[in-house]
């Protein structure tokens, strides 16, 4: 089968289409004929380092496709249209997926749309609700509102969380999309100091929850933007990882809960439980288009280098999808 | 009435006995004839800075005494022996206390013993259970095991939490007391690297929860000692506040929840709720001496300078109490 491997740790030019052995499902696993996959930041990290998160030499952590065969002890029938997280191997014509994280694709969604759902919606859901404990009526600050996780988080915070959403992005075009998804306050971080806007919008109290994909370059402004007793969830370091001279007393005075998280390296059990909880709450919302995957563009699998370069240029609004079949 | 005020922000020599107006209880407040108070680190911080946590010019955040009179809408009867947190003013012959955080003193406890309970036990309880979410069978690392909060936390983690307790202290005498309170593993941090001992004792997994009173000087060793998905509660900076270079990716890779907290500046509602929850779970344990305040020494009120110096020398094991009447 066709699959994408990394030649040497490095840039997008190291991605190559290879012929690879079709995987065999073990007990509890499904073999999926992949129709679409999607690109994630974790794939870029894996490409750049020899030691990725996953043991699978083929990149890709999410797919949508059709169940081709099933190992012992599985519940999903052959022929079912499914989407879900995989333990690497998504950039390929076939991949195995644990049965307990395969979700039947709602009829109104195409394979390309379905492939754009698992990673970003599960990350956003985990971050907002399992870790961030977002409550109705609270205010959440979502950075990178135009990113895949950003577009998912804005929708979930409104539809499931009944929260007030403040979001930041670097272009008015991105902010228009954020607004259309329900964001209440949209801040262009290139034109405004987001902390000042946040304080204006929250009666100088700050927000209850921050979804932080940015890290060090936003650190001081995030600190200024958070409420006393606020929760701050760290899920990316697009703006750098190192904080020079962190004063712990600041965390104590504002009584901040700062939590770091990553989804990809978590256990199979965790991913299965998260998937089940998430789709029990959102299936009907997807079916009625109240939640929708935001797709920036679709590349054929053999244009994987362009797809990665597109993500690295930060121009995309929503997901970059790979059409496999 | 006699009370202790700070002349100028500074050392223990700035503490002086003054004659001060006896306070009057408002609606919902009790006037307490103070029999004993206790010294806390927060008092030292208040003494050193002109801007303390509290508006009350008299130091002291906890007392035990007798209800002398009561404002409208209170439930506690005049003559009741009570202990509890006050909004400053504890180092005095009389103080007002919100009725909803006054706890009737169990008959088996003296006023000196009762005055040694509220601040450290409530702090330990809040930190272990409300913030730290300690579960039975988990392992908790409690630093400064010989301190007031340390001695309370060891007992609570064993008696209420059914947890495995690893504790650190700087003398074998302190560690003996920790062991007698139920600590499972006692580490002399001057003789051993506590992180190495923690990893040995946890099968290289690390602990589920850290109670950190120390801050920057223990930072790297605490990081090495914590489990993936561990909780780390920051409640003191005895070893310094500033981390020179914090790498946020470290927090993400171990998926750490780091929470800063302080008790004294929290709201009246929070303190009332915490007090009620705590004493509903511990009243019988105090009554049967399964939980017990650990008292290092008792000073008369007019030896307040010596009492502060004693705490600042870090030699005390458990609480330093002030006998007022």
Image (tube, coloured by chain):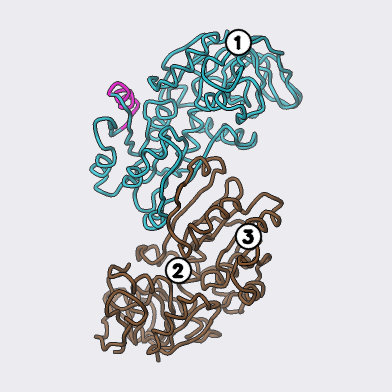
Chain colours: A cyan, B brown
Q: Are marks 1 and 3 in contact (CB under 8 Å)?
A: no
Q: Where is residue B294 in the image (x, y as percent from the top left)?
A: 55, 78
Q: Which of the marked residues, 3 or 2, is nearer the chain's N terminus?
A: 3
For the stretch drawn in magenta, the main secondary structure is: helix
Examine the image and state in which quarter residue A29 appears: top right
Q: Distance between the residues labelled 1 and 3?
A: 50 Å
User: Under tag 1, what secondary structure?
Assistant: strand
Position of residue A86 relative to residue B230, above or below, is above
Q: Position of residue B223 (x, y in %)?
A: 56, 51
Q: In this view, does A164 lie to the left or right of B39?
A: left
**Identity of the residue drawn at 68% across and 66% down:** B184
**Identity of the residue drawn at 48% across and 15% down:** A307
Q: Mark 3 lies on which chain?
A: B
- Quarter of the image for the C terminus of chain A: give it: top right
Q: What stretch is highlighted in magenta?
A: A172-183
For disc 2, the neighbor class at 10 Å (few under 14, some 14 to 19, many from 20) is many
Q: In this view, does A24 lie to the left or right of B243?
A: right
Q: Which chain carries label 2?
A: B
Q: Nearer the viewer, mark 2 or mark 1?
A: 1
Label 2 sits on residue: B275
Q: Which of marks 1 and 3 is in front?
A: 3
Label 3 sits on residue: B194
Which numbered disc covers residue A17?
1
Of residues A325 and B209, the one nearer the viewer is: B209
Which numbered disc covers residue B174?
none
Of residues A319 and A171, the one nearer the viewer is: A171
Q: Does the magenta stretch include residue B138?
A: no
Q: How far apart are marks 2 and 1 (CA)?
A: 64 Å
Of residues B255 and A97, the one nearer the viewer is: B255
**Identity of the residue drawn at 49% across and 71% down:** B120
Q: Do the residues labelled 2 and 1 touch (CB within 8 Å)?
A: no
């Amino acid at each position: 089968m066709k699959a994408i491997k990394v030649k040497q740790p490095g840039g997008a030019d190291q991605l190559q289409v290879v012929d690879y052995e079709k995987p065999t499902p073990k007990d509890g696993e499904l073999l999926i004929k992949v129709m679409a996959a999607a690109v994630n930041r974790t794939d870029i990290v894996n490409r750049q380092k020899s030691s990725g998160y996953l043991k699978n030499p083929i990149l890709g952590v999410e797919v949508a496709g059709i169940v081709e065969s099933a190992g012992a002890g599985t519940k999903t029938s052959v022929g079912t249209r499914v989407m879900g997280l995989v333990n690497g191997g998504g950039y390929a014509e076939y991949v195995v997926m644990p049965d307990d994280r395969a979700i039947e694709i709602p009829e109104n969604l195409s394979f390309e749309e379905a492939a754009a759902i698992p990673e970003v919606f599960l990350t956003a859901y985990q971050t907002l609700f399992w870790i961030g404990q977002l409550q109705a009526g609270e205010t959440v600050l979502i950075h990178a509102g135009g990113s895949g996780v950003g577009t998912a988080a804005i929708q979930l915070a409104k539809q499931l969380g009944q929260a007030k959403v403040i979001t930041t992005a670097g272009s008015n075009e991105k902010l228009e999309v954020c607004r259309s998804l329900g964001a209440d306050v949209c801040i262009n971080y290139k034109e405004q100091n987001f902390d000042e806007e946040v304080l204006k919008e929250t009666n100088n109290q700050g927000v209850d929850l921050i979804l932080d994909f940015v890290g060090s370059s936003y650190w001081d402004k995030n600190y200024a933007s958070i409420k006393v007793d606020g929760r701050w969830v760290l899920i990316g370091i697009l703006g750098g990882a190192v904080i020079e001279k962190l004063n712990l007393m600041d965390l104590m005075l504002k009584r901040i809960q700062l939590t770091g998280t990553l989804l990809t390296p978590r256990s199979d059990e965790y991913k299965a439980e998260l998937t089940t909880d998430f789709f029990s709450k959102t299936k009907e919302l997807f079916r009625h288009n109240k939640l929708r995957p935001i797709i920036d563009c679709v590349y054929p699998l053999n244009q994987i280098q362009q797809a990665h370069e597109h993500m690295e240029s930060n121009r995309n609004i929503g997901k970059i999808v790979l059409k496999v079949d």
